[in-house]
Image: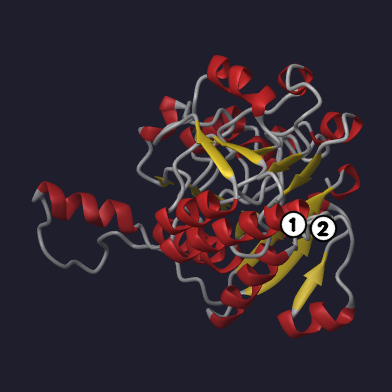
Amino acid sequence: MSPKRLSVVVTRRLPEPVEARMAELFDVTLIGGDTSPDRAALTEALPQADILVPTITDVIDAPLLAGAGDRLKLIANYGAGVDHIDVATARQRGILVSNTPGVLTEDTADMGLALMLAVLRRMTEGMAQMQQGVWEGWAPDALLGTRLGGKTLGILGMGRIGQAMARRARAFGMDVHYHNRRRLHAGLEEPLGATYHERLDGLCSIADVISVNCPHTPSTFHLLNARRLKLLKPTAVVVNTSRGEVIDENALTRMLRAGELAGAGLDVYERGQGVNPRLRELPNVVLLPHMGSATREARLEMGDKVLVNMQTFADGHRPPDQVVPSML
């Protein structure tokens, strides 16, 4: 007799090859579609799940986990960030949590560089002129931007994505400085030509561009608060492809509107889809809909990671990408 297949609840449609392979290996129930299910549907489905496959838009908190019963044993997150999951409560209840690290690195770093270029070179303003049919031709002083070469990039969070940003910035002739919980060892730091700052205040004071590449945790909430944002040069640009909660968005908006910062390129927001409407009005701000990792390759590789974590668990082993509170 073949062993009983594990029951899996999936909250969103995933790439077709991922869904097909998952259905071959497990008994799969999809409770969402192209959008996340409501909380009532998730609450109802969870007690029947051995494994839950959520995405970053699903809030997996302590009250939800309390209603899951004893059957749920793995949350195989489709995504690298886990700030939407109460990992500590899951651990207390004997539920393992896994994620999909590594596969988003290059795509997210590409988007960070794209945002830098778009803001510094005023690309969206130029696009607007062309799309509105108001371009009056080339002029020596039209849409003057700033070159990347020779500028100082301050990286907040020097993990995989921060290091990938550093490599790209170096190729454009930027000076790389960074702040991290721990200094990189010389074997990583030296090839990047990166200078470590133990104090974030010092990094903010010298950066021409500051790139947020750290996760959202209790210790990084509003790490770029109003006081630190005021340490930035008025010619500085802020780029965020990580998590919106790391920046005090209201303070950032006030400073941009007052001309105390030169611009911002944002792919994530403090209140998720609730983008500050005052940001939309600013020509020196580039806003994207959380698409830093949105490549076909990344989405398939994320699914592959989820499947490996699930199958390893089903085989009686710890998932290779298990997340524990000490990592956060």
Q: Is residue 38 visible?
A: yes
- Is residue 111 shown above or below 65? below
Which of these two is toward me, 248 or 272? 272
Which of the numbered marks, if any, corresponds to residue 326? none
Callout 1: helix, strand or loop? loop
Q: Position of residue 144 (x, y in %)?
A: 34, 62
Which of the numbered marks, if any, corresponds to residue 157? 1
- Is residue 140 shown above or below 128? below
Horizontal relation, residue 147 to residue 156: left or right: left
- The residue tagged 2 is 180
Instruction: Find the distance from the CA under tag 1 to the CA under tag 2.
Output: 5 Å
Report the residue that reaches farthest toward the front. 1
Q: How many marks?
A: 2
Which of these two is toward me, 308 or 273? 308
> In percent of the image, x 57 and y 18: which residue is there?
39
Could you say which quadrant of the image residue 67 lies in? top right
Colour option used: secondary structure
Horizontal relation, residue 29 to residue 123: left or right: right
**Quadrant showing the C terminus:** top right
Please report contact status of discs 1 and 2: CB closer than 8 Å, yes or no: yes
Rate crowding at label 2 as few (under 14), some (14 to 19) or many (20 or more) other CA atoms within 10 Å: some
